[in-house]
Image (cartoon, rainbow, N blue to C red):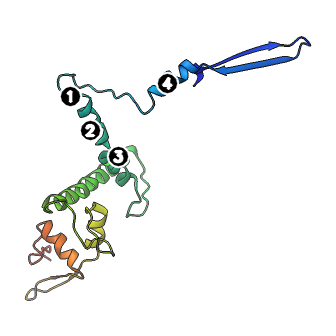
């Protein structure tokens, strides 16, 4: 807007300061023609991607940005204070590995779904929705395991059908629980 604003400061016949300003209508109209347009910079050569492909690629960055939200979101652990930069780097690496597992579980569930990638039962109103990692972990976090013995195997206690559906989508065989040998 500064390019279209013209002003002049001066004095009147009594020596008092004056100010006059106006908008250059031609500049305003030229800028109005470009409203809604923005520049996208890419390293792709013009023969590999046209403007539509570049726009679709840039619009897909929302998925990446959502992962930043997962990374910086509320952690499910208590705060941890480390004593050195090396330990801080190790902690960040563990967090990134956990985020990778989080993303892979979400991806596995979505790929295993047929059709539109939506399933019912994730929310109380039973609407069909695309499962997110957060929702998958919410439902699987309610699972309990009844510890067995040498003659009685451990049993996974399933409280609702959506838990069983998620376990099937993740290809988890609940009949084969693994416990470390004690």
User: Within 10 angstroms of label 2, few (less than 14), some, or many (20 or more) residues?
Assistant: few
Reading the chain from its start, which is encountered first: label 2 or label 3? 2
Q: Element under label 3?
A: helix
Q: Are marks 3 and 4 in contact (CB under 8 Å)?
A: no
Q: Element under label 2?
A: helix
Q: Are marks 2 and 4 in contact (CB under 8 Å)?
A: no
Residue 6, image x, y percentages: 65, 17
User: Within 10 angstroms of label 4, few (less than 14), some, or many (20 or more) residues?
Assistant: few
Kindly identify which numbered label has been placed on residue 49.
Answer: 1
Residue 38, image x, y percentages: 40, 30
Q: Element under label 1?
A: loop
Quote the CA–CA distance across marks 3 and 4. Answer: 31 Å
Q: Which numbered mark, 2 or 4, is in the foreground of this view?
A: 4
Residue drawn at (49%, 24%), measured in percent from left and top? 31
Residue drawn at (40%, 52%), measured in percent from left and top? 72
Residue drawn at (17%, 26%), measured in percent from left and top? 48
Q: Are marks 1 and 2 in contact (CB under 8 Å)?
A: no
Quote the CA–CA distance across marks 4 and 1. Answer: 28 Å
Reading the chain from its start, which is encountered first: label 3 or label 4? 4
Q: Which residue bears the numbered disc 2?
A: 56
The number of discs equals 4
Q: Which residue bears the numbered disc 3?
A: 65
Quote the CA–CA distance across marks 2 and 4. Answer: 25 Å
Q: Which numbered mark, 4 or 1, is in the foreground of this view?
A: 4
Report which quarter residue 133 is drawn in.
bottom left
Quote the CA–CA distance across marks 1 and 2. Answer: 10 Å
Reading the chain from its start, which is encountered first: label 2 or label 4? 4
* Left or right of 86, for residue 19: right
- Image quarter (top left, top right, bottom left or bottom right) of the C terminus: bottom left
Q: Which residue bears the numbered disc 4?
A: 31
| Residue 101 versus residue 28 in the image, above or below | below
Residue 170, image x, y percentages: 14, 65
């Amino acid at each position: 807007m500064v390019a279209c604003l013209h002003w002049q400061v001066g004095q009147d016949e009594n020596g008092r300061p004056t100010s006059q300003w106006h908008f250059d209508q031609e500049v305003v109209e030229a800028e109005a023609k470009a409203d809604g347009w923005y520049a996208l910079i890419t390293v792709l050569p013009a023969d590999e991607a046209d403007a539509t492909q570049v726009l679709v690629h840039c619009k897909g960055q929302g998925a990446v940005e959502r992962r930043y939200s997962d990374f910086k979101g509320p952690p499910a652990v208590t705060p941890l204070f480390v004593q050195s930069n090396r330990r801080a780097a190790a902690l960040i690496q563990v967090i990134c590995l956990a985020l990778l597992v989080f993303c892979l579980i979400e991806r596995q569930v979505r790929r295993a779904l047929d059709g539109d990638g939506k399933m019912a039962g994730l929310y109380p109103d039973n609407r069909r929705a695309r499962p997110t990692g957060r929702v998958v972990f919410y439902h699987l976090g309610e699972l309990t395991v009844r510890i067995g013995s040498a003659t009685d195997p451990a049993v996974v206690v399933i409280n609702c059908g959506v838990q069983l559906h998620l376990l099937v989508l993740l290809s988890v065989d609940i009949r084969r629980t693994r416990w470390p040998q004690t």
